[in-house]
Amino acid sequence: MKKLVLTLVILLGALSTVSAQIPAVVLKTIDGRTISTDTLSNDGKPFIIDFFATWCKPCNRELSAIADVYEEWQEETGVKVIAISIDQAQNVNKVAPLVSENDWPYETVLLDPNSEFKRALGIQMIPYTLVVDGKGNIVYKHNGYTDGAEEELIETVRELVK
């Protein structure tokens, strides 16, 4: 009987997948507005959070690669990208020019100069990308960037919108 109960407990634990929620950290946008990260959403549709820094070449390649297909992704899935710079306070003035220079079409670019949000999520290195479902659950995490890795992101999003 004990084995049966233990087996049931293990099975139920395996079946219930609990996704992490976005922690609450107050950040500023590149135009100075204040946003609490736990309010980030996309009207019930998935969204992507991409951590970057102006000095991080792989980060910039990833955000540029996504920018190249972003309009198509939005038309197909309604996904949106939220880019979060971890540049320190003395370098945050470089973020807006980088976004503009690269013509990144992201509606929200946030500044995390003290890496509070990054730390709250347990992120060690960038680039770091998360996919969040329409309910605010983090369902995918990826560290680093290689050319073409953005395809894995959109495939994850497509699975969520099926």
Image (cartoon, rainbow, N blue to C red):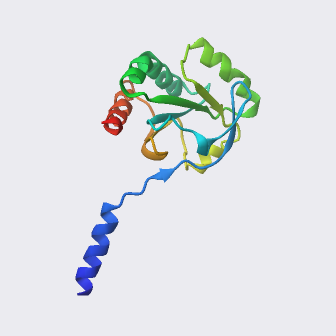
Q: Is residue 115 above or below residue 8?
A: above
Q: Residue at the bottom extreme? A: 1
**Residue that appears at 44% across and 36% down:** 46
Q: How many labels sit on residues?
A: 0
Q: Is residue 2 above or below residue 136?
A: below
Q: Nearer the viewer, residue 30 or 33?
A: 33
Q: Nearer the viewer, residue 65 or 32?
A: 32
**Residue 118 horizontal/vertical position (percent):** 60, 43
Quarter of the view holding residue 10: bottom left
**Residue 114 horizontal/vertical position (percent):** 70, 41
**Residue 25 horizontal/vertical position (percent):** 66, 46
**Residue that appears at 60% across and 42% down:** 39
* 123 to the left or right of 70: right
Is the N terminus in the top left, top right, bottom left or bottom right quadrant? bottom left
Q: Is residue 38 above or below residue 33?
A: below
Quarter of the view holding residue 17: bottom left
Is the C terminus in the top left, top right, bottom left or bottom right quadrant? top left
Q: Residue at the front extreme? A: 43
Q: Is residue 2 above or below residue 123?
A: below
**Residue 107 horizontal/vertical position (percent):** 57, 24
* 24 to the left or right of 67: right
* 107 to the left or right of 62: right
**Residue that appears at 55% across and 31% down:** 82
